Image (spheres, rainbow, N blue to C red):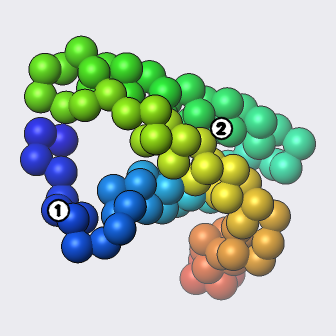
Amino acid sequence: MPSPPDTSGVEFGDKLVHMVGYICLFVWFSQIYNRSNQWRPFVGLVALGVLIEFAQGYSGYRAFEVADMAANTSGVLMGWLISGTIIGSMFLKFESIVFKK
């Protein structure tokens, strides 16, 4: 987005936003793929994070940052770790309760 949220009040706040965003994306996708196929969203999201940074570098109004790539990749890794816990299946559990599957 051309005007990202102001995170100047939090040290490394923009990196935290990147990390949390990619944690959420991976946990969401992890509920679609079983554990043995989670390498697909893992690779895809890491590639997305890298490619977006390169695209931002060419945009003229956003900056290319290797640290953002690292934060994105860290978020994917943390999402993968979280997806192996009960939190990783919370949406599926919620759906089964609501729709009585």
**Marks 1/2: CA–CA distance:** 29 Å
| Rendered position, 28 above or below 8 | above
Mark 1 or 2, nearer chain start: 1
| Rendered position, 91 above or below 71 | below
**Residue that mark 1 sits on:** 6
Residue 70 can be seen in this image: yes
| Rendered position, 41 above or below 101 | above
Residue 83, percent across and down?
A: 73, 62
Asked if residue 65 lies left or right of residue 72, the reply is left
Answer few, some or many: residues within 10 Å of disc 1's Cα (few below 14, many 20 plus, some between 14 and 19). few
From the viewer's perspective, is the residue at label 1 or at label 2 nearer?
1
| Rendered position, 75 above or below 10 | above
Q: At numbered mark 2, what does the secondary structure look like: helix, strand or loop? A: helix
Picture residue at 51% right of the left edge, 48% below the top:
71
Kind of residue indicated by mark 1: Asp
Q: Quadrant of residue 97?
A: bottom right
Kind of residue indicated by mark 2: Pro
Picture residue at 35% right of the left edge, 68% below the top:
11
Q: Which one is in front, 93 or 25?
A: 25
**Residue that mark 2 sits on:** 41
Q: At numbered mark 1, what does the secondary structure look like: helix, strand or loop? A: loop
Residue 83 can be seen in this image: no
Quarter containing the C terminus: bottom right
